[in-house]
Amino acid sequence: MSPTDRTENSSYIATRPIGDATIIVVSDGELLWAPQFPAPEAMLRQAMPEADASNRVWLGLNVVLIGLGDARIVIDPALDDPGTTFECHFIGTSSMEIRRSPGLGAALEEIGWVPTEVTHVVITHPHGDHYAGVMVERDGELAIRFPNARHFLGRADWEGNLQRQARNTELNRRLGAVDRGGLLELVGGEREISPGVHLVPAPGETPGHMVVRIQSAGEELYVFGDLFHHRCEVEHLHWAPAHANASQLEITRRKLFGRLAQSGAVAVAAHEPFPGWGRITGTGDRFHWEPA
Ligand SMILES: [Zn+2]
């Protein structure tokens, strides 16, 4: 495809076609993150030259929308809209600083997507910066944002998830509400949710973490979720946050990066700077992320 096919509709919405599919990335904002990678200071500095004096980096927060045939698919609806109780709670309890965009609700209005017409919602993994937007807050009350959509989540991220045992967690208030509404579908293996759209298990960040593969008219795109958080993890396959299973993540990365380096498929990374399009290049053990 030629780079001219890409459109940045506004400062926080970007579109590109993949075959007959329209892929829209919406920035939900940015997170200031302090990664704790197992490496000496000098190596970290080299890997993240943009980091501040405390080794913190601004991560993107990219939501992906896919229009293909009759399907309207939302992948990782991020943090709920700016100014909500979720955002206040997230800021209060996490060490991360946040910069918000106008948010997903404003983006959907701008591009003309009606929430009731969304057919599928995919949660790559149940971390708050990926799932909170499944609900929308109106006058302090939560409602399911996409009430006619099947919501997909990795089975291993739901069954046995300790946060479900405490009733007052955001997981219960949000994904729990989707489940109680009969809209949550748990996925245990590779699964085609709509023609050309596959969920592919990619464990490591969480046990049930999934990536999404879109194939249309001979073109292919992957939505990576948190397969990596910062592009330096593509070069250092064992670098991972403390909450991840680093050895499992390394196996998953090696497999998927090898496949993508060969196919040349475009990918969207959740936390690369907006719009987060890129390609994996390299061979063997040495891979790189090239913005594309
Ligand atoms: Zn994330």
Image (cartoon, rainbow, N blue to C red):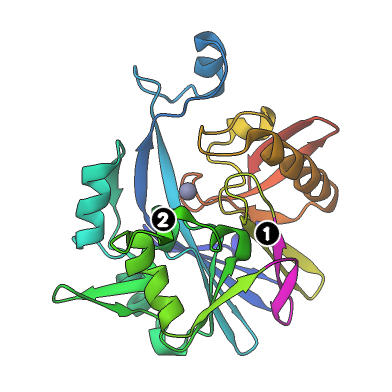
**Any magenta on residue 161?**
no
Give residue 98's position: percent from left, percent from top.
28, 45
Q: Looking at the image, do the residues carrying marks 2 and 1 touch, with CB atoms under 8 Å apart?
A: no
Q: Is residue 257 visible?
A: yes
Amino acid on which the number 1 mark rests in the picture: Tyr
Give residue 231's position: percent from left, percent from top.
58, 36
Residue at position x 39%, y 84% from top? 115
Residue at position x 53%, y 85% from top? 119
Q: Residues within 10 Å of mark 1 (few under 14, many from 20)?
A: many
Give residue 261's position: percent from left, percent from top.
80, 45
**Taking 251 as reference, is 264 above or below it?**
below
Left or right: 4 as drawn, with respect to 191: left
Left or right: 259 as drawn, with respect to 179: right
Callout 2: SS: helix
Q: Which residues are magenta?
A: 188-201
Sequence order check: which comes first, mark 2 or mark 1?
Answer: 2
**Taking 40 as reference, is 194 above or below it?**
below
Relative to the observer, which residue lies in front, 155 or 37? 155
Q: Is residue 1 visible?
A: no
The residue carrying mark 2 is: 163
Relative to the observer, which residue lies in front, 207 or 61? 207
Residue at position x 53%, y 9% from top? 42
The residue carrying mark 1 is: 222
